[in-house]
Amino acid sequence: MTTRNARPPSEAVAGGVAEASSRRAIGRRPPRALGIAVAVAALGLILDQATKMLAVAQLSPGSRVPIIGDLLSLSLVHNPGAAFSIGSGAAWVFTVIGVLAAAVTIGIAVRLRGIGWGIALGLILGGAIGNLVDRLMKPPSFGQGHVTDFIAYGDLFIGNMADVLVVSGVALLCLILIVSSWRPKPHAPQNADSEHGSLHVRTDTNP
């Protein structure tokens, strides 16, 4: 008795190895972004709060310590407004915005996978929480605290490390989106039987 479409043992072994390798490659998923984001945010929060405490201890309000001439210097201010000293007089509004921003960032991180996404979202989350801590804990009152700013960018504005973290995270997100848009989309793996001209398409949906 003969078997139709039978393949030599060597081809069968090679096909099995290739299929197993393909299954392993598909099974390898990048890590969840949430864990990476939380770790990066924690480090960013520590950096932000440590630099703010150092600025309060070493700088006097109104003084200016040049770092790169007039382009970059240290100048201590307590900002009731938003990031970059915008929106004074509505501290509680920015407190609510900070809470929402942190919640949305965490929600996005839960749904995504990948180290890049985790780092970018962690930078944004760390910066948002850094300034939120000031809003909640600093004078004059809970929820309306003034944010400690000390990095003066010429005569444009004065910010802090939390602002740097947020801007860096947004820039990294944009870079990831640009790279992803140029990256070719993966095609479904296919097994072709060239000897008989038949095409077998895998419909395996296992992770």
Image (spheres, helix red, strand yellow):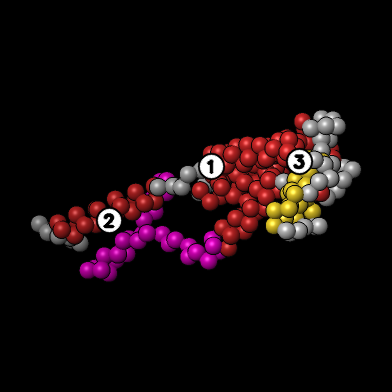
Viewer-proximal residue, 132 or 160? 160
Q: Secondary structure at mark 3?
A: loop
- SS at circle 2: helix
Q: Residue at x 21, y 57 (%)?
A: 14
Q: Amino acid at mark 1?
A: Ile
Amino acid type, label 2:
Ala
> Distance of mark 2 from mark 3, alpha carbons?
64 Å
| Label 3, residues with CA under 10 Å away: few <14, some 14-19, many ≥20 | some
Q: Is residue 28 or residue 1 the one in the foreground? A: 28
Left or right relative to 19: residue 79: right
Disc 3 versus disc 1: distance between alpha carbons?
Answer: 34 Å
Residue range highlighted in magenta = 179-207
**Residue underneath mark 1:** 36
Q: Which residue is mark 2?
A: 18
For disc 3, the marked residue is: 59
Residue 3: where, in percent of width, then height? 15, 58
> Left or right: where does residue 207 sit relative to residue 133?
left
If you read the primary sequence from the N terminus, does the residue marked by circle 3 or circle 1 appear first?
A: 1
